Image: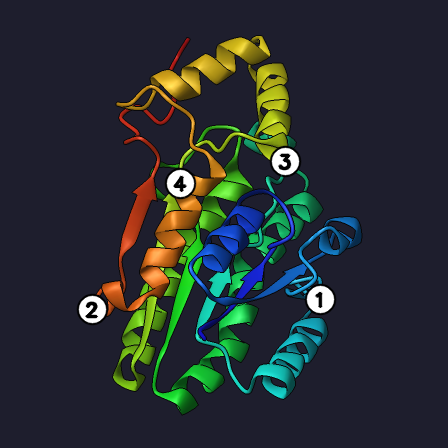
Amino acid sequence: MNRVLITAGASGVGRAMADAFHRDGWQIWIADMDGVALEAAPATWRRSKVDVSDEVAVNALFDDVLEHWGGVDALCANAGIAGPTAAIEDIKLQDWQACVAVNLEGAFLAAKYAAPMMKAQGAGAIVVTSSTAGQYGYPYRAPYAAAKWAVIGLTKTLAMELGPFGVRANVICPGAVEGPRMEGVLAREAEAKGMTRDAVYDGYASGTAMGSFVEGRDVAEMAVFLSSDKARLVSGQVIAVDGFTVNPDPKV
């Protein structure tokens, strides 16, 4: 049975990923900061409370994975935070650093400790969650966009570096995903732009060809595909699951 480790796997997109892998017959290990959400996961799943920006904690997580599983077949480096929503001159350095620490350094650390296991196996798949903000940029979201651009460069490099060992690495770029995190973004962006929440929401939706937000399951099914043998020669790719963003900053 295949084994997948999902960071930020206890809720949101990460939980949708875990559910999708579970349906596909994988063994599941979720890592998250939310202890309550971890406890709510199925009893058959392994779980760890981990800050992905803490190298000591991430190292310990992968030590546990090696001890209990002997390796890992897929890593979904999914952990991320929205960061501040503000004009560039109003962003505090510590808020920038906190956003980059989770979104970029968290993915780096997960890949750093997964890679030796996968290289030893001669196989593996790494799926990193970026964002359409990592393809186009977004006003008032500088730290988030910068980190999400950076994980694309990281993942393409992983694909080149690990490919000779049979390990693939790909990026998923979700568009605006329905859920509590996006609601926070909508509220902060509405305040920054002097707009209503509904106007910002409609702007995001109308900026896509399909006129729609994304659901977690849309991203999850792509993660399962990219981790499977069906995608055995898919590596170094950046795949948007966004309904096709045609206008990343619609004016409404």
Q: Residues within 10 Å of mark 4 (few under 14, many from 20)?
A: some
Nearer the observer: mark 3 or 1; the answer is: 1
Real-space Cα separation, disc 1 to disc 4, in angstroms: 25 Å
Rendered image quadrant of residue 87 = top right
For the point 33% across and 60% down, the residue is 226
Can you give x and y, in whole percent of width and height, for residue 72 in the image? 49, 77
Tag 2–tag 3 contact (CB < 8 Å): no
Can you give x and y, in whole percent of width and height, for residue 105 in the image? 56, 62
What residue sits right under mark 1 in the picture?
48
Q: Secondary structure at mark 1?
A: strand
Q: Residues within 10 Å of mark 3 (few under 14, many from 20)?
A: many
Where is 176 relative to 158, above or below? above
Tag 2–tag 4 contact (CB < 8 Å): no
Q: Between disc 1 and disc 4, whose residue precedes?
A: 1
For the point 26% across and 26% down, the residue is 246
Q: Between disc 3 and disc 1, whose residue precedes?
A: 1
Real-space Cα separation, disc 2 to disc 4, in angstroms: 22 Å
Kind of residue at disc 2? Leu
Q: Between disc 2 and disc 3, whose residue precedes?
A: 3
Instruction: State left or right for residue 233 relative to residue 10.
Output: left
Real-space Cα separation, disc 2 to disc 1, in angstroms: 31 Å
Real-space Cα separation, disc 3 to disc 1, in angstroms: 27 Å
Kind of residue at disc 3? Pro
Q: Residues within 10 Å of mark 2 (few under 14, many from 20)?
A: few
- Quadrant location of the C terminus in the rendered image: top left
What residue sits right under mark 2 in the picture?
233
What residue sits right under mark 4 in the picture?
218
Q: Between disc 4 and disc 3, whose residue precedes?
A: 3
